[in-house]
Amino acid sequence: MTLLFVLLFASPAAAEPKTYMSQEGQVNSLLIFEQTGFARVYGIFTKGLARFFYDDALKTVDGLKLAMLANSFATASPVLRDDMSGHGAYDPDSEREIAFVQNEVARFENGKAKIKGQLVINNIRKNVVADADLNKFGRISETTHVMEEGKETLGFSFHLSFKRSEFSMSADSTTTPFNDDVVLMVDIIGQN
């Protein structure tokens, strides 16, 4: 009788979250600046790494650590990159990386989540909230340059907005043609 009770009413053991790592080419990050209302200017980080824990049963992501290497920052032209750097929009030569460190478990509901963490730019940490979308969870059926066949794979995207002035990036409209508002968009593929 006791064994039957245990079998019927015992909750199944919770699965441990699995660690997912991204490799080069599996993190795509984009900074979007606005040029005083005329146009948006895009800068992409061509190198980034991420690590996070994902629990498929609970649909939670935790421990996300993301680093985008500053020296991999590129724009549509070298002139635009120099213009952004010279006017204080973003100077990739002044730091090693931009980082995001998650500080609270986030649950995906209907494929959406709010990921709370700290954004680190110019050695300044600010609490931010990123809007995230779960893109796909499953196994890769074919090896590509950035993914291994048969591995459990998770892809998700997130974006957040911040003010350049909060991270000691010049926001004085008299000296820069770029607005203070910046959007960071990130797509991550992680494999277990």
Image: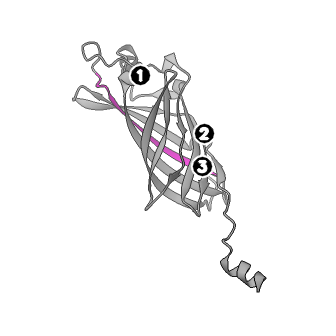
At 45% from the left edge and 60% from the top edge, which residue is drawn? Answer: 109
Residue lying furthest bottom: 1
Is residue 24 in view from this perspective? Answer: yes
132 magenta-colored: no
Which residue has dot 1 on it? 90
- Say which element carries label 1: loop
> Pointer 1: residues within 10 angstroms few (<14), some, or many (20+)?
many
Q: CA distance from mark 3 to mark 1?
A: 28 Å
Q: Residue 122's spot in the image, x, y percent?
A: 49, 21
Q: Which residues are magenta?
A: 178-192
Which residue has dot 2 on it? 24
Q: Earlier in the sequence, mark 3 or mark 1?
A: 1
Of residue 27 and residue 142, the one placed in the foreground of this image is: 27
Of residue 83 and residue 97, the one placed in the foreground of this image is: 97
Residue 18 shown left or right of residue 64 in the figure:
right
- The quadrant in which residue 163 appears is top left
Residue lying furthest front: 2
Q: Residue 33's spot in the image, x, y percent?
A: 33, 30
- Say which element carries label 3: strand
- The quadrant in which residue 158 appears is top left
Which residue has dot 3 on it? 190
Q: CA distance from mark 2 to mark 3?
A: 11 Å
Q: Earlier in the sequence, mark 1 or mark 2?
A: 2
At 29% from the left edge and 32% from the top edge, which residue is drawn? Answer: 40
At 62% from the left edge and 42% from the top edge, which residue is drawn? Answer: 23
Q: Residue 144's spot in the image, x, y percent?
A: 61, 51
Q: Earlier in the sequence, mark 2 or mark 3?
A: 2
Which amino acid type corresponds to the residue marked 2 in the rendered image? Glu
Which amino acid type corresponds to the residue marked 3 in the rendered image? Gly
Which amino acid type corresponds to the residue marked 1 in the rendered image? Tyr
